Image (cartoon, helix red, strand yellow):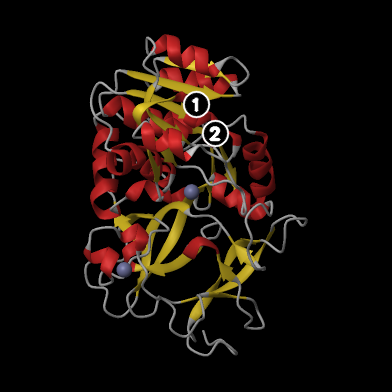
Amino acid sequence: MEHVNSTARTSGATVRAAVWRGPRSPLSVEDVWLADPGSGEVGVRIAATAICGSDLAYVDGHWESSSPAVFGHEAAGVVDRLGPGVTDLAVGDRVVVTLIRSCGSCRRCIAGAPVGCSGRFAPDGFGPLSDARGSEIRQGLGVAAFAGAVTVHRSQVVPVVPEIGLDVAALLSCGALAGVGAVRNTARVAPGSFVVVLGAGGVGLNVVQGARLAGAAKVIAVDPDQRRLDASLRLGASAAVAVGDDVRDKVRSVTEGEMADYVFVATAAVSAIETGFELLARMGTLVLVGMPPSGARVSLDPVMVASAGQRILGSKMGSALPARDIPALVALYREGRLELDGLITARYALVEIEEALRSTRSGDSLRNVIITDESLIA
Ligand SMILES: [Zn+2]
Ligand SMILES: [Zn+2]
């Protein structure tokens, strides 16, 4: 099929996608044009895409984006097209699709930190999505998986074994990768540590699981929602504290006065960062996992931080190496040591995406998953 206006990307097909045209209009499920993979790219038929807090931050306008755009980045599916030069995948491979796009040759890629890649990926400046007139539709976070198919860079795709369902595997792409990775890769939590997790949503619950897997002596989850707190206890938290209770007193009593060696801030609430500092032990580490709204500022006492020998770490996508970490997470899942099925609150069709977003926005769900192609799940 030939396409009219796009300069570099001429072959492709139409797919259904949930198009965003600004924070005040509902997503519109319609046909868009998806270009075939170019050199080093892969086409994936999407089976399932979970809704992440980042999708909602864009949809609701807390983070800035040009419109129109298609979001959705926590996805899994089946390879259905291969671009020139991609020789290590086959059509039909079951894969997790991530937003971590890496060139493999910049300074950070060479240093083993693909999440910091500074490579350039669309030399013609044109992504794979456009409307019927050939005007570009932004590929949100480089994925755009609230759609029947995506065209992404080879580095964004990691094969998974058939023993994990693709609806469950979707959670590995962001929530589990970012949550467990924050513990294992970014903070490298030592066994016996006292850990506090502020925010027990889709990422925070995976921080709880990661802390348990790392052998933390105490894991204290803090969240306003009772359902999430109950989930945190099921996933290995030793204490669950409702926001509004005296969190500081509670952490002091659970850690027998020591306070936290690690505080993970897995919520977008700016106030949680300041709360996190109050919960830190001497030599403690504050790990920023959640992304507050654009322009947020916090105040801290640098003398306190320096004299207590504390550290502040930003955890981008769990400092993940997807090709190493996703298979490792699948192995933990198959051994029954990583819970994923229980993190899915509800499944929706693509046309029901507004309802799914509403449920995610209300904060009472763990992960809501859009099932784009039921036939690929079984
Ligand atoms: Zn995400
Ligand atoms: Zn790179």
Q: Nearer the viewer, residue 220 or 373?
A: 220
Residue behind label 1 places its C-beta within 8 angstroms of ligand 1:
no
For this view, does 21 lie left or right of residue 128?
right
**Where in the figure is residue 38, as x and y percent of width and height?**
39, 80
Please, what is the three-letter code of the amino acid marked with disc 1?
Glu
Residue 359, numbered label = none
Q: Are marks 1 and 2 in contact (CB under 8 Å)?
A: yes
Crowding at dot 1, Cα within 10 Å, few <14 / some 14-19 / many 20+, comes out as some
Image quadrant, ligand 2: bottom left
Q: Nearer the viewer, residue 57 or 68?
A: 57
Image height of 166 relative to 40, above or below: above
Residue behind label 2 places its C-beta within 8 angstroms of ligand 1:
no
Residue ID at (28%, 50%): 160
Cα separation, mark 1 vs mark 2, equals 7 Å
Image height of 158 relative to 235, above or below: below
**Where in the figure is residue 230, as x and y percent of width and height?**
50, 18
Residue ID at (55%, 60%): 147
Crowding at dot 2, Cα within 10 Å, few <14 / some 14-19 / many 20+, comes out as some
Q: Which residue in the structure is indicated by mark 2? A: 274
Residue 340 visible in image: no
**Where in the figure is residue 33, as x and y percent of width and height?**
57, 75
The quarter of the picture where the C terminus appears is top left
Residue ID at (66%, 47%): 352
Q: Nearer the viewer, residue 360 or 220?
A: 220
Q: Nearer the viewer, residue 310 or 193?
A: 310
Q: Which residue in the structure is indicated by mark 1? A: 278
Please, what is the three-letter code of the amino acid marked with disc 2?
Glu
